[in-house]
Image: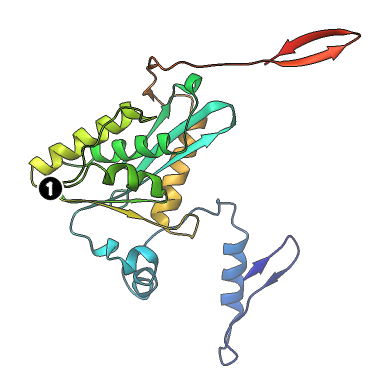
Amino acid sequence: MAVSEDHASCWVHKDLTVTTKQIEALLTAARASAGTDECQVRLTGIEREYWMGTEIGRLGGYDFRGTVTAGDGSNQKGGKVGAGYVNLRKQRKRQQRKVRREEEGSSSNRPELAAFVLAVRGTPMTKPMLYLCDNQALLKAVKRWVGEGGKATLVGAPDANILLEAIEELRKRTTAGAATFLVKLKAHRGEPANEEADIQADKAISGKDVPTEWRDRTNRTVFTWQEPRWKGGTVSYEN
């Protein structure tokens, strides 16, 4: 279906009979003022077949016997960083945090780690958990600390303070016998969990009353420089 300000086109099978009522319903939906990320999962009736065919459905996420969560991070210009997560089974259970320490720079993985920590915190320690995200770097960072192998270290890790908390939360869950699964999804493909997590991450930045965490500076040396500007035979510097 394609919609513009003064025209709408919808392609259907040649043998399908479309009623005037159905056309009006499509136009009403297309002209709705709600954001494009709004999406609700209904696992009853004919809609169940559709959702079971999506990426999460094919992976068994909608039938997962535990808590299904999704998280995302947002890293905007000016050092504004936010993280958020949502519980897919309990849509009202969601959380956002502003993530600071922009003086030392910020990697795209920093808010992703923060979102994961929020989700683990918000899940009962003894309950199986499925965490969905669209960031492969997060999975790689956590995988280094799973199972046996070479000695892993936090030395030199750019986001060691958040990674340490993530590892500790996973250790508690492992000790309690609760399984934790991290699964990567393709971003912005209309998956409700991913889209809702993206909304929560953006709200973390724009919200005025959103708490701030992970702001403590390290002892890392930070260098700054100024660009020279020449005017009238004189030079000045600006950041």
User: Which of the 4 image quarters holds residue 6?
Assistant: bottom right
Q: Residue furthest bottom?
A: 15
Q: Residue at x 59, y 57 (%)?
A: 32
Q: Is residue 8 above or below residue 215?
A: below
- Residue 228 lies, in percent from the top left, at 75, 15
Q: Nearer the viewer, residue 14 or 82?
A: 82
Residue 45 in sight = yes
Q: Residue at x 35, y 75 (%)?
A: 49
- Residue 33 lies, in percent from the top left, at 59, 52
Q: Nearer the viewer, residue 137 or 56?
A: 137
Q: Is residue 224 above or below residue 97?
A: above
Q: Amino acid at mark 1?
A: Ala
- Quickly name the residue at label 1: 178
Q: Is residue 214 above or below residue 39?
A: above
- Residue 209 lies, in percent from the top left, at 44, 24
Q: Nearer the viewer, residue 12 or 165?
A: 165
Q: Quadrant of the N terminus?
A: bottom right
Q: Is residue 126 left or right of residue 180?
A: left
Q: Residue at x 58, y 16 (%)?
A: 224
- Indicate the secondary structure of the residue bearing disc 1: loop
Residue 95 in sight = no
Q: Is residue 6 left or right of residue 148?
A: right
User: Which of the 4 image quarters holds residue 230?
Assistant: top right
Q: What crowding class fits label 1: few (fewer than 14 Cα within 10 Å), some (14-19), or many (20 or more)?
A: some
Q: Residue furthest left?
A: 176
